Structure formats: structure tokens, C-alpha cells
Amino acid sequence: MRFIGLFLKGMVVGVANVVPGVSTGTFMVMLGIYDELIEAVGNFFANRDRMKSYLLFLTPFGIGAAVGTLAFAKLATFVLDRYPIPAQFFFIGLVLGSIPSVIRIHSDMKPAINRVIAFAVGLGLAILVGLGARSGMLGQLSANPFSVMGLLYFGIVGFFAGGAVITPGMSGSYIFLLAGTYEPIMQALDSLTHPPIHWGVIISVAAGVGAGVLVCSKLIDLALKRQPAVTFYTILGLICGSFVGLWPADLDLSASSLAGILTFAAGLAIAYLLSRSGGDKSTQPGR
């Protein structure tokens, strides 16, 4: 049962991973697996005594995430293209609904000066990323994915996206979108089921994402062990600031915006159900 549960949670994270602006880290918090994932990835090579238990956790979760990403890559882009405003409101509902999960995950979340500062830093960083997406300034970067420099560029972007993947409030696909690589990466993923396969893009991005996940998970693991409350306040800031990038740029009182109210409510409901399925685990200071 644990294998199936982790596989299904991995699928949820995989689906979220292909949608720009939706944080997979936030979903992992809602599902109650964030701490365990950070521990497993960050200490996989350092703690050989627990390597077997890490594998038993990471294998079904990783398979589910891969299946979810491949299965929904095309569907996610189709929905965003055809129904952008309802889709964005749905994602806003999901993100907003994740906030109580972050607050509950640690036993001591009382406000303090250093925690408020951490919240402000996270909020500011997420707002800057969102404004960068709206201005399109990072989208001006271009690269030929079939050249050596192009593959290097995709790998570097993948590294930062890997760090964003495991940071609640940040989105790996959002980083791809900002860097102008989202569409060719989605096409490369789609080529896995519709050859010829774009191996160059897939390998360079996968290598970059893998390195980013390993490096950043270690840093986050240390932060959670030494300053858990400050870390979670930073995460809350990132989540709240992500609304800047998710909010529809051209919003009017049209049928699509009215439909957005319904999809927003649906997102809130799903976030609540996901947080309930993840349990109500609290992290003790110092873990």
C-alpha cells in the first residue's frame, strides 16, 4: 500500500511539475512528504545506513512523478492555451489552499523578527520572479538546442529549475518559461512517445535538474534542521509571492473569468483534500 500511495503522490507532483507557476514543492508539503523527500535526497550518499529505506521511498515516488510528467505534459499545455484564465484561477486556488499545510507542518510558527524578515525575503524573491515573467525580460534569451552551447544553456537552466522544483512556492516549469526553454522542453518530453526522440535536450536538462535537486535539497535539509521555523516562514513568503506570476494579466468580467471563480473553488477543495491525505505531521524544533 505504501508503494501505491507514494506512486500516486509522485503522479500528482509530476502533473504539477509541467505547469508553469505551480510549485511541486508546495504540493509535496500538502501531501505530507516534503521533509521525508528532502531527507532522502539530501542524505542519500552521506547516510549509507539508511540508503535502503531512502530507495524504498524514492523509487515509487520517482516512477510516479515520471509517469505524471509524461502523461500530462501535452494536456497541461493544451489547457493553458485554450482556457488560460480558468486554469490560472484553479492553480491560484491550489496554491492558496496549501498555506495552512505549511503553517501546520511545524510546531512553533509564532511570529518573530527574524521569521518576519525571512517571510519578506521569500515574498520579494517570488514577486521578482513573477514580474520577470510578465515583463518577458528573461524570455529574450535564446539558444539552439542542437548546438553545444545550446545544450549547455539547457543544462544550466535545468540546474536552477531543479532547485525550484523542491522549493515550495517556486516552480521548475516557471524557470523554463522565464528562460525561453519551456516549449522545446515540452516538445522533447512529447518526443519520448512520438519519435524521433530529442535526446540532446532531454539528457542536458535531466542532468541539470538532477544536479540542482541534489545541491538544493542538501541546503534545504540543513536549513530545516538548524532553523526550521525561519525556513518555513521563507517558504510561506515564496508561496504568497507566487500569486504575482499566477494572476491573469488580462482579467475582465467575461465568461472565462466567471468560470475562474468555480475553478478557484475547485482548486481550494483539492488542496484541502490533498493536505488531509498527507496527514497533520508537525516538525519539532531541530528535528
Image (cartoon, helix red, strand yellow):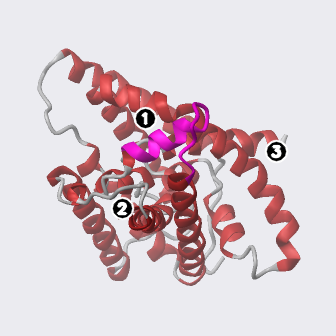
Q: Name the residue under label 1.
A: 268
Q: Which quadrant of the figure has residue 261? A: top left
Provide residue 18's location: percent of width, then percent of height. Answer: 47, 43
Instruction: Mark 3 or mark 1: name the one nearer the start of the chain.
Output: 3
**Amino acid type at image mark 3:** Phe
From the viewer's perspective, is 180 left or right of 159? left
Magenta residues, as a range? 183-199
* Residue depicted at x 51% and y 59%: 205
Q: Relative to residue 22, is residue 238 depicted above or below?
A: below
In this picture, residue 54 sits left or right of residue 24:
right
Residue 195 part of the magenta-drawn span: yes
- Amino acid, disc 2: Leu
Q: How crowded is mark 1: few (under 14 residues within 10 Å), some or many (20 or more)?
A: many
Mark 1 vs 2, N-terminal side: 2
Label 2 sits on residue: 238
Q: What element carries label 3?
A: helix
- Local packing at callout 3 (Cα closer than 10 Å; few below 14, some 14-19, many 20+) is some
Residue 252 position, x and y percent, is: 11, 26
Residue in view at x 52 percent, y 71 percent = 108
Mark yes or no: residue 108 visible: yes
Please, what is the three-letter code of the amino acid marked with disc 1? Leu
Closer-to-camera residue (233/177): 177
Which type of secondary structure does the marked residue at label 1 adopt? Answer: helix
31 in the magenta segment: no
Q: In which quarter of the image is the N terminus?
A: top right
Work out which quarter of the rendered image holds the C terminus and state it. Answer: bottom right
| Residue at mark 3 | 3
Residue 140 is situated, as x and y percent measured from the top left of the image, at 20, 57
Q: Which of 198 and 157 is in front in this view?
A: 198
Question: What separation in Å lies between label 3 and label 2 (alpha carbons)?
Answer: 31 Å
